[in-house]
Image (cartoon, rainbow, N blue to C red):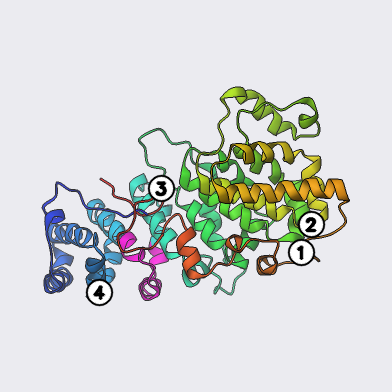
């Protein structure tokens, strides 16, 4: 879990501010701030420092600081960056009333203005995208981010398509620089838990999902986690399995991160995707398996979902998924990941030995919910999880009192 923090060298970061003092600062900033930039700067630093604790965040919201902060996102650079950082913290507790209040104040419009300003600094855009990631962890925020209430079908999803395109085209960031679009990975994970989100990613005309899959090889963990989760959720759409397999070419993209340095013999290579073989041969003994266990489990879960239909299993067998999954299972230290890998192996080997003559889930379903209810899909793989499951699974918000630090999420201490 990550959250934004004030500069430790700043005096405001050392202050312990009471509820009454928060109320006074909000009142002073409201009345005197519009004509006093220095006062707004000091106020934004104080608010960011206060938002470092759960009690502080409750106090800020109770006294209406979020209203000022949203206005300040358009202020001078230091004020706007502090304001966005504080809003990231306020939204990170996953309280519906806070997100609803921000939506009512048109926070998504402000995020869009920040994100699409050409001269926007990467640190500022990164904060804006982190705020969007936090706001889309709930259904209301996710639906609002997709503009589903807009009567114009052309407008619906327009902003997210723009963000996803920027995400897909970026990512080549030098060490030490800010990856300003990284948190769109968390956004696509969040929206893909809704049918409308999966429909957006799978729309043929915009080609979003195929453009996202190369980021499974990104050095950025936030990107890999988000794309893996979105890909897995799209695999619940069994009616689209043939498209995912034949046109998107999803299997090689899922297998490459799961492959390690183990050599493959001639039989194991026969029929394997040419691009995948090229990547494996280029890496040779230096090939490293995906280091993050959550990403490995998600990728294996996506392959398991592709095993739910006869035609998909036959395609997996033909593309030689078995040896890579088998080697992954052998090397895997995590019991849950091993269990998923074993299930895949069992499907593929059993069907080959006994005759593959059934669809595990019956007729193709257009919704992820139908797949999730079947016994063949493990409970933790549901595309529409309970709120607690969403919190436990999200790379942004594993909610507890102490805000456990989690590399790659939207809340972290920053300089």
Q: Quadrant of residue 157?
A: bottom right
Is 104 magenta? The answer is yes
Sequence order check: which comes first, mark 3 or mark 1? 3
Visible in this render: residue 138? no
Give how far apart the Cα atoms at labels 4 and 2 are.
52 Å
Mark 2 / mark 3, whichever is N-terminal: 3
Asked if disc 1 and disc 2 are in contact, CB closer than 8 Å, the reply is: yes
Q: Nearer the viewer, mark 4 or mark 1?
A: 1
Residue 393 appears in the rendering: yes
Q: Which mark is residue 309?
A: 2
Neighbour tally class for label 3: few under 14, some 14-19, many 20 plus, Cα within 10 Å = few
Reading the image, the residue beneath label 4 is: 64
Q: Secondary structure at mark 1?
A: loop
**In the rendered structure, are the residues bearing label 4 and label 2 in contact, judged by CB atoms less than 8 Å apart?**
no
Q: Nearer the viewer, residue 138 or 330?
A: 330
For mark 1, does the 10 Å Cα neighbourhood hold few (<14), some (14 to 19), or many (20 or more) residues?
A: many
Q: Position of residue 54 (x, y in %)?
A: 26, 66
From the image, tell me which residue sits under label 3: 118
Read off the residue under disc 1: 361
Q: Which residues are magenta?
A: 87-110
């Amino acid at each position: 879990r990550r959250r934004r923090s004030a500069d430790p060298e700043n005096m405001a970061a050392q202050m312990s501010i009471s509820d009454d003092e928060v109320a006074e600062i909000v009142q002073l900033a409201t009345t005197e701030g519009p004509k006093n930039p220095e006062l707004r700067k000091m106020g934004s630093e104080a608010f960011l420092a206060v938002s470092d604790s759960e009690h502080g965040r409750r106090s800020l919201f109770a006294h209406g600081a979020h209203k000022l902060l949203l206005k300040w996102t358009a202020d001078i650079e230091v004020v706007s960056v502090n304001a966005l950082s504080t809003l990231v913290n306020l939204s990170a507790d996953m309280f519906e009333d806070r997100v609803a209040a921000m939506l009512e104040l048109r926070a998504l419009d402000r995020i869009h203005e920040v994100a699409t300003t050409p001269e926007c600094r990467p640190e500022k855009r990164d904060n804006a995208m982190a705020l969007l990631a936090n706001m889309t962890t709930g259904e209301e925020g996710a639906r609002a981010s997709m503009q589903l209430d807009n009567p114009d079908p052309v407008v619906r999803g327009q902003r997210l398509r723009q963000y996803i395109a920027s995400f897909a085209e970026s990512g080549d960031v030098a060490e030490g620089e800010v990856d300003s679009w990284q948190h769109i990975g968390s956004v696509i994970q969040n929206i893909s838990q809704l049918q409308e989100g999966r429909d957006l990613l799978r729309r043929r005309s915009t080609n979003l999902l195929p453009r996202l899959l190369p980021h499974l090889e990104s050095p950025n963990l936030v990107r890999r986690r988000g794309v893996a989760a979105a890909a897995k959720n799209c695999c619940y759409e069994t009616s689209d399995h043939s498209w995912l397999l034949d046109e998107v070419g999803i299997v090689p993209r899922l297998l490459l991160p799961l492959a390690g340095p183990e050599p493959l013999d001639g039989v194991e290579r026969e029929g394997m995707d040419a691009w995948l073989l090229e990547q494996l041969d280029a890496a040779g003994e230096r090939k490293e398996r995906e280091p993050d266990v959550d990403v490995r489990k998600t990728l294996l879960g996506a392959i398991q979902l592709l095993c739910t239909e006869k035609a998909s299993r036959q395609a997996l067998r033909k593309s030689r998924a078995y040896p890579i999954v088998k080697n992954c299972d052998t090397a895997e230290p995590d019991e849950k990941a091993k269990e998923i890998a074993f299930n895949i192996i069992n499907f593929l080997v059993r069907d080959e030995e006994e005759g593959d003559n059934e669809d595990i889930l019956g007729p193709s379903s257009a919704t992820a919910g139908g797949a999730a209810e079947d016994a063949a899909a493990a409970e933790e793989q549901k595309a529409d999880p309970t709120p607690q499951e969403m919190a436990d699974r999200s790379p942004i918000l594993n909610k507890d009192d102490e805000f456990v630090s989690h590399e790659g999420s939207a809340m972290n201490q920053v300089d």
